[in-house]
Structures are given as structure tokens and as C-alpha cells.
Image (cartoon, rainbow, N blue to C red):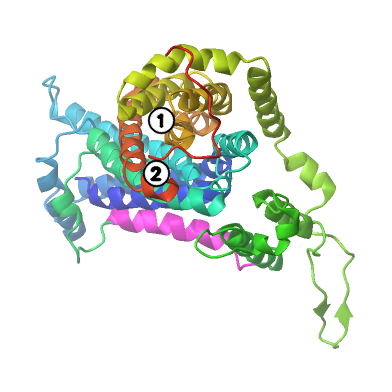
Amino acid sequence: AFNLYEIEWLVLGFMVSCAFLSMWLSNTSAAAMVMPIVEAVAQQITKAETEADALEMSCSNGSINPTLELDGRHAIQPLGNRSHEGVRHNPQNLPPAEAGRKNKEDKYNGIFKVMCLCVAYSATIGGLTTITGTSTNLIFAEHFNTRYPACQCINFGSWFILSIPIAVIILLLSWIWLQWIFLGFDFKNMLKCGKKKTAREEASAQVIQKEYKKLGPISYPEIVTLVLFILMTLLWFTRDPGFIPGWSSLFSKYKGYATDSTTALVIGLLFFIIPAKTSTRTSNGENTVFGYTPLITWKEFQSCMPWEIAILVGGGFALADGCEVSKLSEWVASKLTPLGSLPLWLVILISCLIVTSVTELASNPATITIFLPILSPLAEAIHVNPLFILIPATLCTSFAFLLPVANPANAIVFSYGHLTVMDMVKAGLGINIIGVAVVMLAVMTWIVPMFDLYTYPSWALNIPSTNI
């Protein structure tokens, strides 16, 4: 007997948590933080199942364990209606003991696969929602603001509003997809309320509570970090919200100097100023003064700063400038101008499919760096708002779900040894299709009025078509 319904909700909880972390941290860091907890929970579930089986064997002489019987009522009946990879009904006519052991192994494997893949995929999906969530979004924002300085429509707030519905929809559909191909998905039984917790549910809850208690009480540096994080988020959202003047309007004399980078740099500077410890009062009433140490020292910053990402992103900007200065991007765009005779939605779909395919083999920053200088002149050549093509192409560049080498989050999860390459290909192909479909839906519906996409903007370059 194995109750899989609590696993479904547990997986959704891990996906939401990992996606939220990935909004503010790098995808790699989010996956590296969540994966050890997922591994501990998965191992504890296996341990609880093994103990339950041993107890059941000890009671097989005629006594009945009501807890196991309850678990059986919750678990055995629905599994007969589930059609999934993890549960097979003795297709090879094995002896009953061998068949039971093999079924248990398949169940464990299915659970481990879902819990691992949910971390890898939610880390990528969460990074879509903010400009700082992934390097591809940063490269797009820098390229767009450099090529079209007269347009100030892409900022932290506008990107969050357009991408958060996309991320939520993809996250929920990915959750359903992973459950369906590895564990089955019985939505009706899953929503039943008032069910008594099984031994497996209690084991999972105990692991999470244990990991939470290890954190201890919140400390002073953590409080300061939380306050600075909230302040940074508020400053990002209120810099230029669009419907009301933001705080950047206070510096209208220096237009273009107050950007999202300004907020990040100011908050980062505060980490080097605010002390990491406060003075404490002893039992005698005297203050114990500690030596001044900031929250982050320069030595810690140097050791933790991912310089390779800064070099990679900077190299991408240099490559993009080289494509434009050498007129390579305009030449490629002129060759793609015949695409203007196709329906607009088909042009966008082709662009999305191309970048989604390339990003599986090349790194996401390299892919977006190569295609942005090509797609921008293409949009100008066919007289289409550049955002109509650049936004979906940027989002689809993050859809590297197929292979372990496609992005670092996939590699971290794959290193735990619960997945095969075919597992990732099978699951990732479906999520790639889901992602492209949701992005197409978004760019043809709610994103259109946000940027007036059906109107060719005055800030875009007027490049005459070369093959009229």
C-alpha cells in the first residue's frame, strides 16, 4: 500500500518554494538550496514505508494493524485506477514476492524522479518572473534599453506584471504533467478533505519540521537582510510603475541615471556598511561592545561573487555590439525578411521554437546574445513592434528542460543519481511544449495592451525592407 496523494501536494509545495527563491536568487542557487531538503524528505518517505512493511510482516500471523489497514483503504483502491509508469501489475508473471518488491522499487523511483524534476524545473520557471531572476532577462533588458533608449517601458515592475501569470500557469501545468507521467494524477481523490494523516505524511512533515528547527531562531543579520530585501523590492516596483510617477521622477534633471541598477547598488553598499553584530547588555548592566564587522566583507564578497557570470554577460554584450557594428545582424535580418509574408503569430512561433531548440545545446546567455541582435532588425524590417518578437524569444530561451547539461539547475538535480537522461527528455519535452504554448497565449492576449504591440512604435528604427 502506498498513498500517493500527499506526495502530489508535497511536490507542489516544493515547486512553489523553489520558484519563489529563484525569483530573487540565481536558478543554480535556488536548486542547490532546495535539493538537499527534497533528498532528505524522499529518503524519510522510503524509511517510513520500509518500517511500515516490516510492521505489516510482523502482524501477518493474524493480528491486524488498524493504521496499515487505514493506509490500505486510502492507497490500494485508487492505484487500480491510475495508469502511470511507477506502478506496474506484474507483466512478466514474476513470483508474488519478487513482483511486490519490483512494484515497490518502481514506486520509489517514480517519487524520486518527480521530486527531483520539480526542483530543477521550478528553479527555471521562477527565474522568468523578474529581470534579475536569470541572466537571459538581464541581457534582454540591457540590449533593449541600449538599442531603443527612447523606450522606457521595460523595467522591473512591467516585466513582473507580464511574466508572473506566465510563470504561475507553467508551474501548475508542469506540476500536473510530472504527476501524470510518473505517478498518475487523480484530481478527484486528491482534493478530498478531512483525510487522516498516514504514516508517510507524518514522516514527511517530521523531516520538514526537523530541517526547520535546525535553522534556530531568526538572528540579527537575517532580520537586517530581510528588511533590505523588502526595501530593494519596493524600490524596484516603485521606480517607474507607469500608472503614477515613481521615485525616479525626483531625478528628472538626470534622466536615465536612476535605473534598477541604482537600487541594487545602493542596497549592496548598505551590506558593506551596516554592522553584523550589535552591542549586548550583560547582567551587570554594562554594554559589551563587539569589534565593527559589516554584514559582508570584501573578502567574503570576492569568494562568493560569481565572477564567471559577470564575464559571461559582459562578453555577451560585446558579442552583440560586434554583430551590430559589423552589420552582421542587419544582413541576417535582411535574409529573414521574407518571413514578413507569414502571419505574425507564425513568425513569433518560429522564433520561439528556434531559440528553445538552440538553448538545449548552448547556454542560455549565449543563445539570447546571439539571437537578440538578429531578431531586433528582423522586427524592424517586417515593421513589427520589436517587443512582439523579443519578449517571447527571451522567455523561451530559459526553457532548457530536456538535458542535464542544458542548465546548471538540471545538472545539480541529475547529480543525485535518481534520474536518467531519458527521464529528463521525456518530462522536459512536455514542459517545453507547455512553456511555448503559454508564452504564445500571453503574447497574443494580455501582453498586447500593456505595450500596444499592434502599433509600430516611434522609438523603433525605420529600416526599409531590402527585398521589396
Q: Position of residue 107 (x, y in %)?
A: 26, 36
Picture quarter with the C terminus: top left
Is residue 405 found left or right of 96 in the rendered image? right
Q: Position of residue 89 (x, y in %)?
A: 13, 30
Disc 2 marks a residue whose amino acid type is Ala
Between residues 449 and 213, which one lies in front from this camera angle? Answer: 449
Disc 1 marks a residue whose amino acid type is His
- Place residue 396 in its image quadrant: top left
Between residues 89 and 220, which one lies in front from this camera angle? Answer: 220
Q: Is residue 468 above or below residue 167?
A: above
Residue that lies at the very extreme toward the bottom in this rendered image: 285
The answer to whether residue 204 is magenta is yes
Q: Is residue 369 above or below residue 77?
A: above
Q: Is residue 225 visible?
A: no
Mark-to-mark CA distance, 1 and 2: 11 Å
**Residue shown at 36% from the left, 40% from the top:** 443
From which residue to which does the magenta span run? Answer: 199-219
Prevailing SS of the magenta stretch: helix
Q: Are marks 1 and 2 in contact (CB under 8 Å)?
A: yes
Q: Which residue is under mark 2? A: 42
Q: Position of residue 235 (x, y in %)?
A: 62, 61
Q: Which residue is under mark 1? A: 418
Tell me the crowding category of disc 2: few under 14, some 14 to 19, or many 20 or more residues within 10 angstroms, Cα based. Answer: many
